[in-house]
Amino acid sequence: MGTNRLANIKINQISALQIFQLIRYSTLILIGVVFAKSALSTTEIGQYETVLFLAGAVSFFWLNGLIQGFLPATGKNASVSRSSDLFNVFYLLLAFSVLSVAFVVVFEHSISGYLLKGEGIPFLKYLSIYLLLASPAGLAEYIYLIKGQGRQMLVYGAVSYTLMFLLVVLPPLFGFGIEGGLIGLVISSVVRFVWLLVLLFLNSSPRFNSAYISGHLKSAAPLVFSMFLSGSGQYIDGFIISGYFDDATFAVFRFGARELPLVLLLANSFSASMLPGFGNHSNLKANLEKIRSNSQKLGQWLFPLSGLLMLVSHWAFPVIFNMNFSASATIFNIYLLLIISRLLFPQTILIGLQQNKPILWASFLEIMLNVSLSLLFLRFWGLPGVAYGTVCAYIFEKLILMGFVKKIYGFHVSAYLNVKQHLLYSLLLTAEFVVVEFLIW
């Protein structure tokens, strides 16, 4: 009976991608917890975090931009099977991966000179292999998304990230050090890359289509640049911190600067899962209402959950990790405030309707404000000041995008957001932050 009921649970595109991203992020968190409880030093953990940080810093913008630029077009020809579109997106991702590896290798001394005080990028060979394979492998879950195979996506996520967890944490626990964990990270990326190839051959044709690649690059270019500008906030924070502090402090910041996983994961995956639906313009009104209702539902439990975590974070961080990461709690609490901007979805509307240039302009303004405020606040509040700058800049960006949606399409904010609920929850969470950080701790 239990198995039959489980089999009858409906897994749609939105929930499948949300759960998948939760599995991925939870794996990263669990690896960090195991490392903190192990015999590894804070410096070794910082080296592992540096490898992940660099891999993400040079790939997140083109990976997300190219994939999200591709998704709206799938709504127009979702019934087309065995086309070469998926393979050509893969070719693009692989080419950008090669360029990213080349960038890191060529500019190793410049990167290490600023980021690592000239000590050299740790484990460069593992970083290069991981970057080359793991970035294109991120296409796999989106193949499941556009094919409507939610259950298969979840099975893939559970298997691949369980394997990653075991391959990364077991070598250090058995005395092979952080290098053993990084070798395991590389092996897990090889497995995911091979499975992507299997999916591609099952669902697409390997025929190279230069016209498609050229057209996709042209349409996705503004989105890639906007992702680079807007999405680089966390990496800007990391570069600023690394420029002023040592590896141990960098690890403290990174452990705190993760925000509430559920907010980031559920919001981003919801936004991505909505994009194929915008290919059919006749469903525009229904899509706006879907954004409004889902953002309202997310807010009704994610805001209270954020408030609860804010109350217990200063107690929980030393327990979950260790006393060396006590200061991470304040950074974490500041990043919890990002929920205010995360649950606003004007960018979903613009990307879905393939209006990417306004996103580029908003991202440019956001990055300028982010850098300026982070450096300014660093002088007043130290480590937390960098996080304050990021929160302010992200909110500013979403307000600009909401203005673009109104100007271009005439959509009032209330068409895709429960304004009163969002404002109320935002004010309550901000008031709680002030009490927790300035009156209690």
Image: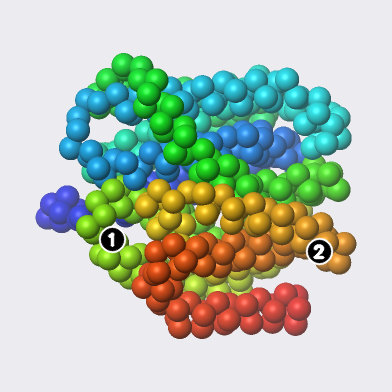
Image location (x, y in percent) of residue 331: 70, 61
Mark 1 or mark 2, whichever is nearer to me: 1
Determine the residue positioned at 57% across, 27% down. Answer: 131
The residue closer to the viewer here, 311 or 116, is 116
Which quarter of the figure is the N terminus placed in? bottom left
Image location (x, y in percent) of residue 330: 71, 65
Give the amino acid type for the residue marked by disc 2 in the picture: Phe
Label ID, residue 438: none
Residue where numbered disc 2 is placed: 377
Q: Is residue 302 left or right of residue 176?
A: left
The residue closer to the viewer here, 25 or 65, is 65
Which quarter of the figure is the C terminus placed in? bottom right
For marks 1 and 2, give the CA distance: 41 Å
As drawn, 373 above or below 68 = below
Residue where numbered disc 1 is placed: 284
Task: Assess disc 2: are there few (<14), some (14-19) or many (≥20) residues with their C-alpha within 10 Å of its C-alpha.
Answer: some
